[in-house]
Each structure stands twice: as structure tokens, then as C-alpha cells.
Image (cartoon, rainbow, N blue to C red):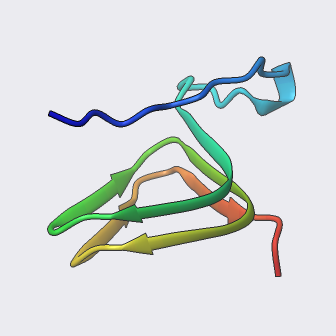
Amino acid sequence: MLAPVVYLTRAQAKDVWPSGLILAGESISLKSNGTLANSGRIQGGLDVILGAERIVNDGGVIESQGT
């Protein structure tokens, strides 16, 4: 069985979302066969790629610093 690996780094106060939920990385790609729901922060350095039948952003933030 394969399990995802998540590498965490020390967060600064300005980086912490009130709910405490952050997904950050240089390049983020999330894919879902159904609904992809976000209520926290998804932050990419270069890019954020989301793929799903339905994407629900319920008060969260999805951003990238890339062009």
C-alpha cells in the first residue's frame, strides 16, 4: 500500500490560517474524481493545478505566486 508523503517546514505567524489548515508548496497538483473541497489555504510558489468534477472553495484561499 502506498501512502502520500508530506514534508512540513516551520511556519511563521503570517503563514498560519485561522483554521490551521495550510497546503503549501512550490508546485501543487490536486486531482479528484468527485468533489474537491477547500476551506483552508492552498498556496503554490510556482503553480496550483486543481482538477475535479466540482471544486468548492468554502471561505478558503487558493493562490499562486507564479505567472
Query: Residue lying furthest front in this view?
Result: 1
Q: Position of residue 17 (x, y in %)?
A: 65, 31
Q: How many marks?
A: 0
Q: Nearer the viewer, residue 59 or 66?
A: 66
Question: Which residue is found at the position 71% from the left and 26% from the top?
Answer: 16
| Closer to the camera in the image, 11 or 26 | 26
* Residue 13: quadrant of the picture: top right
Q: Residue at x 52, y 72 (%)?
A: 49
Q: Residue at x 82, y 65 (%)?
A: 65
Nearest the eye: 2 or 48:
2
> Is 16 located above or below residue 22 in the figure?
above
Quadrant containing the C terminus in the rendered view: bottom right
Where is residue 24? Give x, y as percent: 65, 44
| In the displayed structure image, the side of residue 21 where residue 38 appears, left or right | left
- Tell me if 57 is positioned left or right of 41 in this view: left
Name above or below for residue 54 compared with residue 3: below
Residue plotted at (24% across, 64% down) = 32
Asked if residue 21 lies left or right of residue 17, the reply is: left
Question: Could you say which quadrant of the image residue 54 lies in?
Answer: bottom left
- On screen, 53 above or below 39? below
- Quadrant showing the N terminus: top left
**Relative to the observer, which residue lies in front, 55 or 4?**
4
Q: Residue 38: x percent and y percent?
A: 41, 51
